[in-house]
């Protein structure tokens, strides 16, 4: 894409009052953006409103600055930085099939993704992993371990770079992907020259080295709350199916799941404790027909039925759990009375003391030992939760 072509696409994207839907109608009628701006008022009036026609006649005030910024960004790293438009052969085919595909996509990531058909080729082998920004410790562990196993099974993990489940999913995918595999795709709600949340700055850099970051928002776009629900349609559109790890009944993750279902794609959900608010969204999805999954292999077998490189069922549940808890799993008694008393629901100290009959000091010492080994998580409100092998 040369500078003149980029300027025309950016002008169309920036024109006030002309949204993506109107822009697509204009492109369908006139072809490339420069033809839209060369069209007569009478011709434009057949497609757009009077106010839109008037706006199209004038160059947006911020176009020149954005063009300079975007062009410099593209030239700074020609291997990793891309601007994909609806007319670009590297634009993901699965997004073109959506009702409202983005007019422009800004991309940053591995060079192979920008080859013709690059992103489109991996879409049949991709799965969205989404969930709560405030997961339980078990939910965060599930997101990471499931995503690691999904990547080991040959799937590209798509998520939104948010705190909580999203970040854990990207981390797991990076850990599980083979060299040369497109590990993960992060669809963000800001310009690609910004990272939100800032805690994920290092994670975003690592994704760019082994995966892709995508945004429909121009460079410089700050983290506006309205942008994040909108990007969920891209997460769903890029994926063969969507796995919801944990989610409240009203959450962006359920929006992603609904969009995936409306696109005729599979929706998967991990069940959880009936006492945890973060599980209720998953339970609602299962009631509505989402597929209940207990291990990553359930997802792999559904999306890649002919896959010959999927991990064994035990591996798909996260065989690395032993390493993540210091390699001490085998040293712990499977019949530990405290773990048995905990079950898998959040439990308070008083209830545990009643169940075990242990003295307070002994019980607290044992809980601390189990917490250090990664088998128990301390929750707000003085509660404890057993960490299962995900």
Image: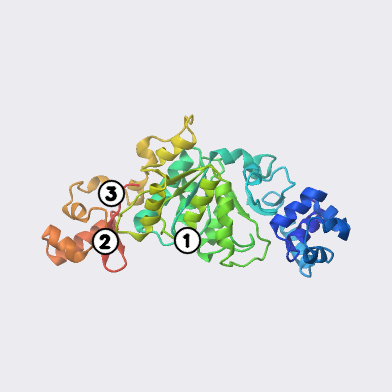
**x and y, in percent, of residue 356 in the image:** 13, 58
Between 213 and 276, the residue placed more toward the observer is 276
Q: Earlier in the sequence, mark 1 or mark 2?
A: 1
Q: Is residue 179 left or right of residue 272?
A: right
Up/down of 134 relative to 297, above or below: below
- Badge 3 vs badge 1, beta-carbon distance below 8 Å: no
Q: Residues within 10 Å of mark 3 (few under 14, many from 20)?
A: some
Residue displayed at 74% across by 63% down: 14
State the mark number for residue 163.
1
Distance from disc 3 to disc 1, alpha carbons, whole Å, reads: 28 Å
Kindly state the secondary structure of the residue where label 3 is placed.
loop
Q: Is residue 208 left or right of residue 249?
A: right
Residue displayed at 46% across by 60% down: 251
Distance from disc 2 to disc 3, alpha carbons, whole Å, reads: 20 Å
State the mark number for residue 328.
3
Residue displayed at 57% across by 43% down: 182
Between 92 and 323, the residue placed more toward the observer is 92
Between 48 and 198, the residue placed more toward the observer is 48
**x and y, in percent, of residue 71 in the image:** 76, 58
Distance from disc 1 to disc 2, alpha carbons, whole Å, reads: 22 Å
User: Where does label 2 land, which residue?
Assistant: 384
Residue displayed at 36% across by 43% down: 294
Query: Which one is in front in this view, the residue at disc 2 or the one at disc 3?
Result: 2
């Amino acid at each position: 894409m040369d500078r003149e072509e980029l300027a025309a696409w950016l002008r169309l994207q920036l024109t006030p009052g002309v949204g993506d839907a109107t822009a697509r109608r204009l492109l369908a009628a006139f072809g490339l953006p420069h033809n839209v701006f060369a069209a007569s008022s009478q011709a434009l009036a057949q497609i757009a409103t009077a106010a839109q026609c008037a706006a199209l006649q004038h160059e947006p005030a911020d176009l020149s600055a954005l063009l300079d910024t975007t062009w410099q960004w593209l030239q700074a790293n020609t291997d990793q930085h891309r601007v994909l438009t609806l007319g670009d052969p590297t634009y993901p085919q699965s997004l073109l099939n959506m009702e409202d595909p983005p007019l422009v996509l800004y991309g940053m990531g591995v060079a192979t993704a920008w080859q013709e058909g690059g992103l489109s080729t991996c879409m049949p082998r991709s799965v969205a992993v989404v969930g709560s920004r405030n997961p339980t410790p078990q939910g965060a562990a599930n997101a990471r371990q499931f995503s690691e196993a999904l990547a080991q099974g040959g799937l590209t993990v798509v998520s939104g770079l948010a705190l909580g489940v999203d970040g854990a999913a990207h981390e797991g995918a990076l850990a599980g992907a083979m060299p040369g595999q497109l590990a993960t795709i992060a669809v963000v709600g800001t310009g690609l020259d910004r990272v939100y949340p800032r805690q994920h700055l290092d994670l975003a850099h690592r994704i760019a080295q082994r995966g892709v970051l995508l945004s429909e928002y121009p460079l410089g776009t700050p983290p506006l709350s309205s942008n994040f629900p909108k990007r969920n349609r891209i997460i769903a559109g890029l994926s063969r199916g969507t796995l919801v790890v944990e989610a409240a009944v009203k959450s962006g993750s359920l929006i992603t799941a609904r969009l995936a279902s409306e696109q005729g794609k599979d929706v998967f959900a991990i069940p959880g404790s009936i006492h945890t608010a973060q599980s209720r969204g998953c339970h609602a999805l299962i009631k509505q027909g989402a597929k209940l999954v207990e291990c990553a292999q359930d997802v792999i077998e559904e999306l890649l039925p002919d896959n010959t490189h999927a991990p064994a069922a035990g591996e798909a549940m996260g065989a690395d759990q032993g390493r993540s808890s210091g390699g001490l799993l085998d040293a712990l008694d499977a019949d530990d009375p405290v773990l048995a008393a905990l079950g898998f629901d959040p439990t308070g100290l008083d209830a545990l003391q009643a169940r075990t009959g242990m003295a307070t000091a002994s019980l607290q010492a044992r809980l601390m030992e189990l917490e250090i080994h990664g088998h128990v998580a301390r929750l707000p409100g003085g509660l404890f939760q057993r960490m299962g092998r995900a």
